[in-house]
Image (cartoon, helix red, strand yellow):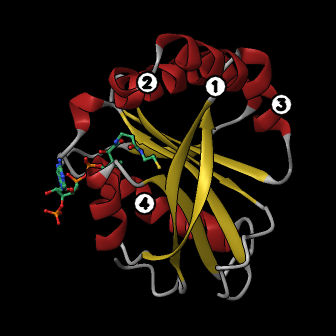
Amino acid sequence: MTPMTIRRASPADAAVLAPFAARCFEQAFGAQNDPEDLAAHLAKSFGVAQQTQELQHPDYVTLLALTAGDEPAGYAQLRRQPAPPCVTAARPAELRRFYVDGRWHGSGVAGQLMQATLAAAHQTLGAASLWLSVWTENPRAVAFYARHGFAIAGSADFWVGSDRQSDHIMVRSALVPLTA
Ligand SMILES: CC(C)(COP(=O)(O)OP(=O)(O)OC[C@H]1O[C@@H](n2cnc3c(N)ncnc32)[C@H](O)[C@@H]1OP(=O)(O)O)[C@@H](O)C(=O)NCCC(=O)NCCS
């Protein structure tokens, strides 16, 4: 297991987070998406200005996993956001983004980041459950979330540029005890 420092990101991290988040998205989904749709999505979601806004927003909590050399290895973003109707668990927050750089996949970093994310959802946002939306064609992520106590509760559309994709809504209905 590679030990990481995991801490809450602040607006000062936007210049590091924006290109890292774009790179993670492209790494994960670039090959399966039309280049124009991908470029439109990256520009809309991962600019420095957009990241700064999200890092300043009181309803967002972003966690960064950093290597001993202070390089980003992964990040997670929580949001206080009304849940879709299929989520019936108490006091839900959204796990909006959860990404680990490819070079750290299978290393245990994702598990460490998930534990920190569950704790932050409970302690910082006062949530009692978490929901997320994950592409149905992302079996690695679906398996990872299932191992960490999330179950499929419904489905939703997700737009990458002009391309409509089908997502699972997954829910973890208890955050405490903080074990997977
Ligand atoms: C999702 C993610 C955070 C998981 O981290 P990870 O380090 O890869 O996770 P792990 O290796 O601990 O676990 C992945 C699980 O998927 C399994 N797996 C690996 N490749 C797989 C595949 N092609 N199909 C199905 N399952 C697969 C692994 O065996 C493991 O399951 P197990 O623990 O039951 O054996 C990471 O892969 C990632 O950042 N992916 C890209 C971004 C992403 O998809 N984020 C989610 C957006 S909603």
Tell me which residue sits at (42%, 65%) in the image. 115
Identify the mark nearer the N-term, 1 or 3: 3
Identify the mark nearer the N-term, 1 or 2: 2
Q: CA distance from mark 3 to mark 2?
A: 26 Å
Question: Is 145 drawn above or below residue 150 in the view shown?
Answer: above
Q: Is the Cβ of the residue at disc 1 closer than 8 Å to that at disc 2? A: yes
Q: Is the Cβ of the residue at disc 3 closer than 8 Å to that at disc 4? A: no
Q: Nearer the viewer, residue 40 or 105?
A: 40
Q: Nearer the viewer, residue 22 or 167?
A: 167
Identify the mark nearer the N-term, 4 or 1: 4
Q: Which label sits in the foreground, 2 or 4?
A: 2
Question: Is 8 drawn above or below residue 39 in the view shown?
Answer: below
Q: Is residue 121 left or right of residue 178?
A: right
Is residue 109 visible in this depiction of the protein? yes
Q: CA distance from mark 3 to mark 4?
A: 23 Å
Give coordinates of residue 174: x percent, y percent.
Answer: 53, 86
Residue that mark 4 sits on: 114
The three-letter code of the residue at mark 1 reads Gly
Q: Which label sits in the foreground, 1 or 3?
A: 1
Give coordinates of residue 171: x percent, y percent.
Answer: 53, 75
Q: CA distance from mark 4 to mark 1?
A: 28 Å
Residue that mark 2 sits on: 33
Residue that mark 3 sits on: 53
Label 3, secondary structure: give it.
helix
Rate crowding at label 4 as few (under 14), some (14 to 19) or many (20 or more) other CA atoms within 10 Å.
Answer: many
Question: Is 97 drawn above or below residue 172 in the view shown?
Answer: above
Residue that mark 1 sits on: 161
Identify the mark nearer the N-term, 3 or 4: 3
